[in-house]
Image: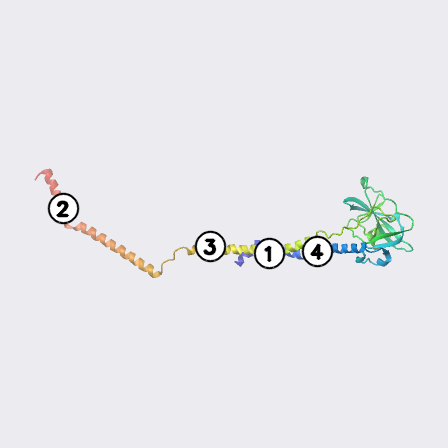
Amino acid sequence: MLKSFLRPGWLLLAVFVVTFAAACFTVLAPWQLGKNSDTEHRNDLIRTAESTQPVPIDELAPAGRPLDPDSEWREVRVTGHYLDDKQVQIRLRVVDERPAVEVVTPFQVAGTDRVLFVDRGYVRPVDNNRVDVPPAPTEEVTITARLRKTESTSPGKEPRTENGVRTAYTIDTGLIGESTALTSDRLYLQLSPNQPGSLGEIALPQLESGPYLSYGLQWLAFGVMAPLGAAYFIYSEVKARRTAKHNADDAGSDAPPPPPRKDRDRIRDELRGASTYSGNDMVAKETAEIGGGAVADDSDQDVKAKLAQRYGK
């Protein structure tokens, strides 16, 4: 019976089940569970940031040092002035389910050469995707903003200049720095509401985990169900074949068994003897009828009587 499961159909099923289960446990479930962990971690950082007072930027993000991931979303204070002539528009953004353009303006820290990119907020595009951006203050100001890690850029989406306007699709501080001939840390500031130079407010993300945990558990369940389903199919196949074999055996057992050999021999001899006896009786009877005198005499008298009646004595 094992050989019957070595057919191409069963082999393909086995390969599919093993591959699918492995993908569920090693790729799909970890992917969704990882996104859930990232979302939970982000929510924890936002909760901490909302309950913490702003601090000077040098306490959390000193110049020349990478941003501590646990410091993201914290509010900091910094004094300096905007470099409005180096402004960049970030296209293809969505705010409140509507198209928006975010405005990033470099900000030089007072008394230093340090430059930080500040996301001042968003404006809505008007005719032909044109945007009217209010200018940033030119005087020295103190702003409060949230620390954000730099974004990444997909190939072909690098910053560019169109009709004299610098545009980009992500806030990648490295590439924006190259397009504006400025050097900046690998972080940017998201301006808090009601600050000098602020535009449309970019709200904090909703503190919800999303569907990632349930998706991850579903992939784990699928990874378990796949081999169980294959095992059920194999069990059903084996059971069906055993039932068919059992029914065939029962059908064969219903026929009367042949008589023992000695009984067969005895019955055959009796039939032969009966046949011989009957044949001999028939031969003897016929012989007696042919050669019997009585039969012959009776025949002669009849002939004589008929001749006498016809021709006379």
Q: Nearer the viewer, mark 4 or mark 2?
A: 4
The residue to which callout 4 is attached is 33
Sequence-first tag of 3 and 1 = 1
Amino acid at dot 3: Asn
Amino acid at dot 1: Leu
Marks 4,2: beta carbons within 8 A: no
Marks 2,3: beta carbons within 8 A: no
- Residue 13 found in image quarter: bottom right
Real-space Cα separation, disc 2 to disc 1, in angstroms:
102 Å
Real-space Cα separation, disc 4 to disc 2, in angstroms:
124 Å
Sequence-first tag of 3 and 4 = 4
Sequence-first tag of 4 and 2 = 4
Amino acid at dot 2: Asp
Identified at 57% across, 55% down, the residue is: 232
Q: Position of residue 196 (x, y in %)?
A: 88, 48
Q: Position of residue 197 (x, y in %)?
A: 87, 48
Q: Position of residue 94 (x, y in %)?
A: 78, 46
Amino acid at dot 4: Leu
The residue to which callout 1 is attached is 228
Identified at 10% across, 38% down, the residue is: 311
The residue to which callout 3 is attached is 247
Real-space Cα separation, disc 3 to disc 4, in angstroms:
51 Å
Q: Residues within 10 Å of mark 4 (few under 14, many from 20)?
A: some
| Observer-nearest of 250 and 76 | 76
The residue to which callout 2 is attached is 298
- Residue 35 found in image quarter: bottom right
Sequence-first tag of 4 and 1 = 4
Q: Secondary structure at mark 4?
A: helix
Identified at 81% across, 40% down, the residue is: 128
